[in-house]
Image (cartoon, rainbow, N blue to C red):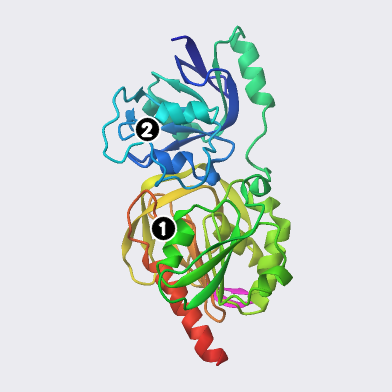
Amino acid sequence: MSKAFLVLDDGTVFEGESWACEGETFGEAVFSTGMTGYQETLTDPSYHKQVVIMTAPHIGNTGMNSSDEESKKIWVSGFVVRNPSPVVSNWRSERTLEDDLIANNVVGIKGLDTRAITRHLRDLGSMRVGIFSNTELTREEMIIKVRKSPQMAGSFLADSVSTLEKYIVPAIGEKKFTVVALDLGIKAATPRSMSERAIEVHVLPATSSMTEIMALKPDGIFLSNGPGDPATMVDAIALVREIMAAHIPLFGICFGHQIIGRALGFDTYKLPFGHRGINQPVKNLRSGVVEITAHNHGFAVAAPVEGNFNTIYGAGFVSHICLNDGVVEGLELLESPVFSVQYHPEAAAGPHDANYLFDQFVTLMTNAKVSNA
């Protein structure tokens, strides 16, 4: 096993061992606090162009299987673990983690103190990173390469992960609603969660127009998660404004939440190190209930937490906040059928405290049908 190096753009270098594919890779260094769910993390398109550092010391124990994949490939730019499990033990396992990483040409590194790296990023913020294995580059040459790599702020990535062709996830049982889901990097569990609620989901490319959406006569529109800087999504923001002006029920999560925020006139900003993992505490400000939720986002909406806010689409309010840092985690309009959250209600993998949000979407569409009857 050859030496490998994890190099941050502040000049910090961690030495470990090569794992999975050898070579070089670059991306944004982020950490995930989940003790399980590594397969869902790896196949989540929101992690495109990111090097994921797992804080849990043992990764790979349960192997990989086709049922838990959130997309058809692994999206991370690199994968950093302390101790990959030498043995796979799970009745659902079909392959090893390392086999899948190699099949997807993912450069990995093992044998590092991933919690020390996490503390470093928590103190100094997310930054660019490179993994180098089987290399003859000097320390200085590796640092220069990392500093020349793209930053996440200002990155437009949705077109790289979105579906090229429309597809349909049929409703389970008798269809009650038709929803158009704009694929900005959607996870497979999301339309599946809607199909379980008698919703037929039409998943459309991120570049779809209002004309294409309305041709399907949707009862509601859904904006998915995805990678990149929401400020770059100019066309999607304009599309959301058309949707809100038409008073069509609209539900957005994660990246979709941020795009809705910008469409309402709020700025978005880069978080110091983001929220990633399946154990993030969020408070529902309407009910006072604290939910344990699954997150993957590096940007946030700058909306006022206290009281109502005014927009050209009517008044609204912040519905959820993160209890770790007070970041806005949900938005809702009072006079239009629009709401969003910055986390994953489908929670694959993760807790199921936020499943009710899909039911809230169903209620919104039901009320709209009644009022339009």
Compare marks 2 and 1 and give the one earlier in the sequence: 2
Give the image location of residue 285, x and y in percent: 39, 68
Q: Nearer the viewer, mark 2 or mark 1?
A: 1
Label 2 crowd (10 A; few <14 / some 14-19 / many >=20): many
Q: Do we see residue 167 in this rendering?
A: yes
- Nearest the viewer among 253 and 70 is 70
- Residue drawn at (53%, 17%) of the image: 22
Helix, strand or loop at label 1? It is: loop
- Amino acid carrying label 1: it is Glu
According to the picture, the residue beneath numbered tag 2 turns out to be 55
Give the image location of residue 79, x and y in percent: 47, 29
Is residue 189 within the magenta segment?
A: no
- What mark, if any, has residue 130 been given in the picture? none
According to the picture, the residue beneath numbered tag 1 turns out to be 346
In the rendered structure, which segment of residues is drawn in magenta?
Answer: 309-316
Q: CA distance from mark 2 to mark 1?
A: 23 Å
Q: Is 86 situated above or below 326? A: above
Q: Is 202 situated above or below 297? A: below
311 sits to left or right of 190: right
- Nearest the viewer among 275 and 196 is 196
Q: Quadrant of residue 110?
A: top left
Helix, strand or loop at label 2? It is: loop
Q: Is 307 situated above or below 273? A: below
**Outermost residue, bottom side:** 373
Query: Mostly what secondary structure, the magenta segment?
Result: strand
Labelled pair 2, 1 in contact (Cβ < 8 Å): no
